[in-house]
Image (cartoon, grey):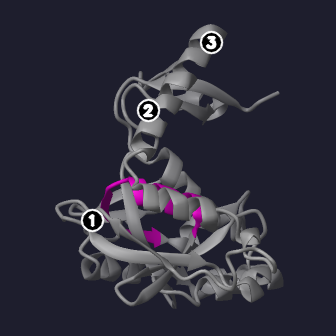
Amino acid sequence: MSSKISVVLLRDFALLGRKGELVDIEKDYANSYLLPQGIVKQIKNKDLLKHLKEKQQVQKRREQSGLSEHSKALLYIYNDPAVITEGNPIMGRLPPMSFRVHFKNSDGRRMSWEWYPSHRLNRLPAGYKYVILLYKGRKYLGTFHYLQQLLMRKVHSPLIIDGSNLGWVKGKPAMDPIFDLYDYIADKSEKFFFPFVWAFDKSFKRKLSKTERRELNEFCAWSGTKIVDYADEEIFKLAKRYHTRYIFSQDHFRQYHTEYFTRITYR
């Protein structure tokens, strides 16, 4: 039995979407908070649910049509690293794909991307297509699905992430939530963020399994990642350095003056 239900947002709600959008939400979260607060309405009628899904798919296709034909063609080629095979007319390693990313209050800036180095993929968890995002001389790790949204959506600001706080599953430190955040921001967030800037405690790294420590080391080999003695202090320094007020964490930071900052989380 599915643990999720389909609901329509009755008002804009950060990280879930805009008013009128159809989203799938964890049933417990919907019943305990979203439904009682009048934030969403559950859709039980199968015909209505099908109609709303079709309508939303049409809207997404319209948004995607804003890409240039050149970008669409390149996305088709780049969509599967397997196209780069011996005997294929596209020989060798594809060059970075350049595109224009649109920032809030900006005319747009050039950046590019390329597939994650294949010889390093075994250092990361399976399940995602990883990419490298090249921006202002720096290389950021991302997922291909996140990249697709980056091509189409307007970037609101950088996002500072409390990695040590995010990386927990059932009371144990884990790396899976770190990688899941890319799809969460791509699919569920009203605002879109780039780049992701991460801060981890050294103590968090020590608590990880040997395999996950290797994953964290690979993750932190790219720009926008730091492992420090005490991440809370570093988070607010990074927010000022990157000129953003948005921090992703479930920590309320009660010991800090946080009036200027906006804390967001999965809920």
Residue type at numbered disc 1: Arg
State left or right for residue 28 relative to residue 86. left
Determine the secondary structure under disc 2.
Answer: helix
Q: What residue type is labelled 3?
A: Lys
Q: In this view, does 50 lie above or below 242?
A: above
Q: Mark 3 points at which residue?
A: 44
Residue nearest the viewer, comparing 82 with 17: 82
- Which numbered marker is on residue 59? 2
146 part of magenta stretch? yes
**Residue 87 coordinates in the image, percent (x, y):** 81, 77
User: How far apart are labels 3 and 1 at the CA level?
Assistant: 38 Å
The residue indicated by pointer 1 is 245
The structure residue drawn at horizontal position 60% and vertical position 25%, both measured from the top left corner, is: 6
Measuring 48% from the left and 30% from the top, which residue is drawn there?
58
Along the polypeptide, which appears first: circle 1 or circle 2? 2
The percent position of residue 159, horizontal first and vertical second, equals 38, 67
Q: Could you tell me how far apart the alpha carbons at marks 1 and 2 are, in whole angstroms? A: 30 Å
